Image (cartoon, grey):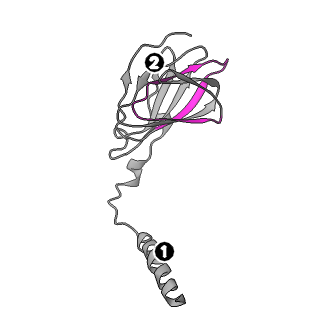
Amino acid sequence: MTRMFCWTCLCLFVLPVAAEDKPVPSNLPDPATLVTDSAQLPVDKSTWGSLQWLCNDKLSPGALQTVGLAVLLPGQRNPVHFHPNCEEVLYMLSGQGQHTLDGRVVELKAGMTIRIPAGVKHNLINTGKEPIRTVMAFSSGDRKTVFLDQPSTK
């Protein structure tokens, strides 16, 4: 009985893990094409703040994610929008504000992270006295955005 139990454990738990640990053949491109330098990348400025894209399919062909930095000025908000093809994760580096999700409001401050599912209408409002700085990540290298309004001063 003990031998059968050990053989069953070996077959169910050890052998599958060992097979998964083998390296997968890779078509790794030139590593230099996988690196971006924020000092060399454009910053898109608007009346409400700025966006800088650090990684996406345009900057790094084949990328399956989009990563960027955003700054939202005090008293400002970005336009209500949604992403039909990907979810967004936003990490608050500094500042405080209110994030709307399909009309519901979530208070955010530095150190907090919010996950916004694909297709959910959202925007961020800076309710503090300092700029909000965020890191954003999207589950697609070709992030799509549909804007529903234009920003205004709160």
Q: Position of residue 99 (x, y in %)?
A: 55, 25
Question: Is 23 left or right of 75, judged from the image as shown?
Answer: left
> Quick one: SS at disc 1?
helix
Number of numbered discs overlaid on the protein picture: 2
Vertical arrangement, residue 94 with respect to residue 8, above or below: above
Which image quadrant is residue 127 in?
A: top right
Q: Position of residue 106 (x, y in %)?
A: 59, 26
Which image quadrant is residue 146 in?
A: top left
Which image quadrant is residue 81 in?
A: top left
Question: Is 6 left or right of 74, judged from the image as shown?
Answer: left
| 101, 20: nearer the viewer | 101
- Mark identifier at residue 98: none
Residue 115 falls within the magenta-colored stretch: yes
Report how far apart the C-alphas of labels 2 and 1 lie in the structure: 50 Å
> Quick one: SS at disc 2?
loop
Q: Which residue is mark 1?
A: 13
Q: Residue at x 66, y 19 (%)?
A: 128
Q: Residue at x 52, y 28 (%)?
A: 70
Query: Which amino acid lies under the numbered mark 2 shown in the image of this protein?
Result: Pro
Outermost residue toward the top in this view? 153
Q: Which residue is mark 2?
A: 79
Outermost residue toward the front in this view? 1
Residue 61 falls within the magenta-colored stretch: no
Q: Position of residue 126 (x, y in %)?
A: 59, 19
- Dot 2, crowdedness within 10 Å: few (<14), some or many (≥20)? some
| 60, 142: nearer the viewer | 142
Query: Which range is magenta?
Result: 111-137
Question: Is 143 left or right of 110, judged from the image as shown?
Answer: left
Q: Residue at x 48, y 74 (%)?
A: 13
Vertical arrangement, residue 11 with respect to residue 29, above or below: below
| 89, 66: nearer the viewer | 89
Q: Is label 2 in contact with label 1 (beta carbons under 8 Å)?
A: no
